[in-house]
């Protein structure tokens, strides 16, 4: 079943670092009338899911990041723009009244613990803390689940910005927040309706569209919450070895939605690609994979442990992808190579080996330039590495597999 949407209709509704290009998904999907089941096991903000739905396919996905799940659900929702704007007007009106009843010393979400309140005190000035508290309480009382999610998405856009937001930080959208302002350059009440209008305008799916609903679950790619042989195709972009710390930026919004700093720290610690090297396995089990990625003798024990953990976890991801994929299924994996302490790490070669180990056969490998604003890591500095390595760090690799 085809929709009348085009690739140009798939515009992001919320900032998200290193988002996969929708064109990769669009070009990977077959041009036929048959509805396929497309899985993204690490769905992030929902690029695969929104693109697959726009092309008329059934899309399913999961992630561990609460804000990523919210953005993906909103991006794939059927949106009643006028109804959403009407609800936003009511929420703002009620929040402005409520703000006059809240004392500054009580301007926190209801269940915020001491650590979370200290975080809010440091990153948000008193005026915005009061206004965000009022808005968050009023949004939480909205009954319609789709409207509520979309309003939370707009609320988050007030915070997750590069320069001008309602916090004292800069560069939250790239997950590199640093305190820049004593008083935030924007007040929440002044910009809330503008962010709602933005989300309503950019949302690609309108209420009543003829397209299968998207299934998005809270879940881990290492233990997928889907039954075996349920999908026709996997399209995903796993984290690089030294992955972006998404929670570092996302917690600025999530604390207003009922999450504590402690609970978010737990999610962050267990994410794929984190620096927690807490696995105890025989190294020779993955020696072949490690040697395809790098010269293992050039890393100290700590960084070797990071790479070993990454390999173990991606091995589990490929095992799970093969379990849920039909026997004639395909997988498209988008990855970039990276550096660790100046050593070039061939992530793509490691993933090819792990995929082969888990029942996949490589049928195509292509590279494409990686736009600077989508790089996981800052561009290499002049003189620090060779020009050849710098070129490779500016590319992403698209791997296409077939199930054996």
Image (tube, grey):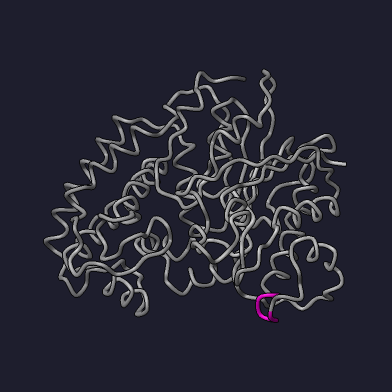
> In the figure, 253 relative to 283: above or below?
above
> In the figure, 47 relative to 340: above or below?
above
- Determine the residue positioned at 76% across, 45% down: 324
Q: Nearer the viewer, residue 352 or 119?
A: 352
The answer to whether residue 191 is magenta is no
Q: Quadrant of the C terminus?
A: top right
Q: Nearer the viewer, residue 17 or 219?
A: 17
Q: Main secondary structure of the magenta part?
A: helix
- Determine the residue positioned at 75% across, 59% down: 316
| Residue 236 sits in quarter | top right
Q: Nearer the viewer, residue 192 or 169?
A: 169
Residue 223: x, y in percent? 71, 58
| Left or right side of 35 for 188 | left
Residue at the extreme left: 100
Q: In the image, which residues are magenta?
A: 300-304
Residue 67: x, y in percent? 46, 55
Q: Nearer the viewer, residue 106 or 219?
A: 219
How many numbered marks are there?
0
| Left or right side of 185 for 403 | right
| Residue 239 sits in quarter | bottom right
Q: Quadrant of the N terminus?
A: top right
- Determine the residue positioned at 79% across, 41% down: 229
| Left or right side of 323 for 178 | left
Residue 43: x, y in percent? 58, 47
Residue 261: x, y in percent? 42, 72
């Amino acid at each position: 079943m085809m929709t009348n949407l085009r690739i140009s209709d798939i515009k992001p509704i919320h900032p998200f670092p290193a988002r996969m290009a929708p064109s990769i998904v669009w070009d990977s999907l077959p041009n036929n009338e048959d509805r396929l089941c497309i899985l993204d096991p690490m769905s992030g903000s929902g690029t695969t899911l929104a693109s697959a739905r726009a092309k008329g396919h059934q899309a399913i996905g999961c992630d561990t990041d609460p804000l990523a799940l919210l953005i993906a659900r909103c991006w794939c929702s059927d949106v009643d723009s006028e109804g959403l704007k009407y609800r936003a007007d009511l929420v703002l009106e009620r929040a402005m009244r409520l703000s006059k009843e809240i004392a500054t010393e009580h301007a926190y979400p209801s269940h915020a613990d001491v650590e979370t309140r200290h975080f809010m005190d440091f990153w948000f000035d008193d005026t915005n803390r009061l206004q965000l508290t009022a808005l968050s309480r009023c949004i939480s009382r909205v009954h319609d689940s789709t409207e509520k999610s979309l309003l939370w998405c707009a609320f988050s856009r007030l915070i997750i910005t590069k320069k001008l937001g309602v916090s004292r930080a800069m560069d939250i959208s790239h997950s590199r927040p640093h305190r820049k302002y004593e008083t935030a350059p924007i007040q929440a009440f002044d910009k809330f309706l503008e962010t709602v209008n933005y989300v309503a305008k950019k949302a690609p799916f309108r209420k009543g569209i003829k397209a299968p609903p998207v299934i998005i679950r809270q879940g881990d790619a290492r233990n997928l919450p889907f039954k075996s042989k349920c999908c026709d195709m996997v399209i995903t972009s796993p984290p690089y070895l030294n992955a972006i710390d998404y929670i570092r930026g996302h917690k600025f919004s999530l604390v207003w939605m009922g999450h504590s700093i402690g609970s978010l720290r737990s999610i962050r610690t267990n994410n794929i690609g984190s620096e927690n090297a807490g696995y105890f396995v025989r190294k020779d089990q993955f020696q072949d994979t490690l040697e395809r990625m790098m010269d293992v003798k050039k890393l100290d024990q700590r960084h070797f442990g990071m790479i070993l953990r990454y390999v173990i976890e991606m091995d589990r991801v490929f095992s799970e992808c093969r379990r849920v994929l039909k026997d004639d299924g395909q997988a498209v994996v988008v990855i970039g190579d990276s550096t660790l302490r100046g050593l070039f790490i061939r992530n793509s070669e490691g993933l090819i080996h792990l995929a082969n180990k888990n029942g996949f056969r490589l049928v195509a490998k292509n590279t494409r330039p990686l736009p600077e604003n989508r790089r996981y890591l800052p561009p290499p500095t002049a003189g620090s590495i060779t020009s050849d390595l710098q070129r490779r760090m500016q590319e992403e690799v698209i791997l296409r597999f077939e199930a054996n």
